[in-house]
Image (spheres, rainbow, N blue to C red):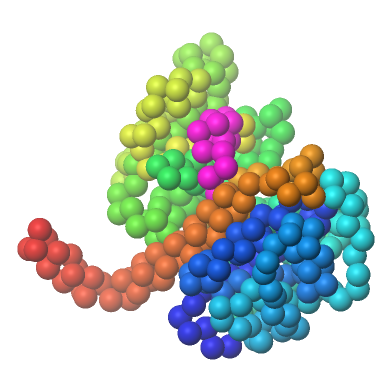
């Protein structure tokens, strides 16, 4: 496959009865997007043609049966299946979960084989996609199994990044899941990610407490005193610029989050409620810590508006740009790591010019 310096961007189509197809097609209905990447939608030409008509979009597809047949400046659709599919927008259907899984498995296989450069996933329904081969609470855990590395959910938007110590974990299990080993592992992943994928040389990391008011010196739970605080102290001794733990209730409302490169929340809602309040519609979910790059929009299948031609595609478009930018930064970082003397020389010249 001749990439001609264009990033080949794979797209898993997600739940077919949701808004995934709409946000994907509306993103690439703008022909200017093809200047940034070459998209490959893992689905079927017949199905995407149906969606194109449903959303009244004036676009065309290039159907392929192998990723190697990708054509630049075209919206490529790889035929993962060829049989017709009956769509019932807004319906929770196990059959649609099976198709979503086919698309995901095919796109991840292409990502692993480096036949595509990055992957952007449209939303799945976490219930109806469950099967013998998919027994995960979401994309993040599935990708952790399939790709090298330790996965971490990192929500990103302009000026705001939120990482999680625990993601899809029941609230009752959060405190026993957070161990010293887990904290160190997750913060090390975030630290490395900010350096290699976002170009931040000395990341400033803020960590939110596990309990309300960071436990109030043990009055409201002792997990912060016994586990979180000593672990953060150890990370500081090892050179990490880590602040906290902070009481979560006032951290975002006070604007304190603006002073850091990333905020690490202890559990899902502690981090995602403020993130989606501040950045909903423009936020991106990035699976950090893996050997390959995957992003997704910050919303779900939205069955309530599916098929009504009302879905906002801004978050999916931002996910596309995020994947492209992270891919470029990581490549630059790896090149610099190969030539440290040349990199130092560039820094010296830059300082002299300044």
Left or right position of 45 against 8: right
Q: Residue at x 86, y 76 (%)?
A: 82
Location of residue 236 in the rendering, given as x and y in whole percent from the top left corner? 34, 40
Task: Identify the image quadrant of the C terminus.
Answer: bottom left
Position above or below: 62 against 296: below
**Was residue 134 drawn as part of the magenta stretch in this picture?**
no
Residue at 49% over, 57% down: 322
Q: Quadrant of residue 62?
A: bottom right
- Location of the N terminus by quadrant is bottom right
Q: Is residue 308 left or right of residue 245?
A: right
Q: Is residue 193 left or right of residue 132?
A: left
Answer whether residue 148 is visible to the viewer in this image.
no
Measured as percent of width and height from the top left, residue 351 is found at 11, 60
Residue 325 locus on image (x, y percent): 44, 62
Q: Quadrant of residue 76?
A: bottom right
Name the side, left or right, on which 302 lies relative to 280.
right
The answer to which of 353 and 237 lies nearer the viewer is 353
Of residues 137 and 28, the one drawn nearer to the viewer in this rendering? 28
Measuring 79% from the left and 55% from the top, which residue is drawn there? 15
Tell whether position 285 is magenta: yes
Q: Residue at x 39, y 56 (%)?
A: 198
Q: Which residues are magenta?
A: 270-287
């Amino acid at each position: 496959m001749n990439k001609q310096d264009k990033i080949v961007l794979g797209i898993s189509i997600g739940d077919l009865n949701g808004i995934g197809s709409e946000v994907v097609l509306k993103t690439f209905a703008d022909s200017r997007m093809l200047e940034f990447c070459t998209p490959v939608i893992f689905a079927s030409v017949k199905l995407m043609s149906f969606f194109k008509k449903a959303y009244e979009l004036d676009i065309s597809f290039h159907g392929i049966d192998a990723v190697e047949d990708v054509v630049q400046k075209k919206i490529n659709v790889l035929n993962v299946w060829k049989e017709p599919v009956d769509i019932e927008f807004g319906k929770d259907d196990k059959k649609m979960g099976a198709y979503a899984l086919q698309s995901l498995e095919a796109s991840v296989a292409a990502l692993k084989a480096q036949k595509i450069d990055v992957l952007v996933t449209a939303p799945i329904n976490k219930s109806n996609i469950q099967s013998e081969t998919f027994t995960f609470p979401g994309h993040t855990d599935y990708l952790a199994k399939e790709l090298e590395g330790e996965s971490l959910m990192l929500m990103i938007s302009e000026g705001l990044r939120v990482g999680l110590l625990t993601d899809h974990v029941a609230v009752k299990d959060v405190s026993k899941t957070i161990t010293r080993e887990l904290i160190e592992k997750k913060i090390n992943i975030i630290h490395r990610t900010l350096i290699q994928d976002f170009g931040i040389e000395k990341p400033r990391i803020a960590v939110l407490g596990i309990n309300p008011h960071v436990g109030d010196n043990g009055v409201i739970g002792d997990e912060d005193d016994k586990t979180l605080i000593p672990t953060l102290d150890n990370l500081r001794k090892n050179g990490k610029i880590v602040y906290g733990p902070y009481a979560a209730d006032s951290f975002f409302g006070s604007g304190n989050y603006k002073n850091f490169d990333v905020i690490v929340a202890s559990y899902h809602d502690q981090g995602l409620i403020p993130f989606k309040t501040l950045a909903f519609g423009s936020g991106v979910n990035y699976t950090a810590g893996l050997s390959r790059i995957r992003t997704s929009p910050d919303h779900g299948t939205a069955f309530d508006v599916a098929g009504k031609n009302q879905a906002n595609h801004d978050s999916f478009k931002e996910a596309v740009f995020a994947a492209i930018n992270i891919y470029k930064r990581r490549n630059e970082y790896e090149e610099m790591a190969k030539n440290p003397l040349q990199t130092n020389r560039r820094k010296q010249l830059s300082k002299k010019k300044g």
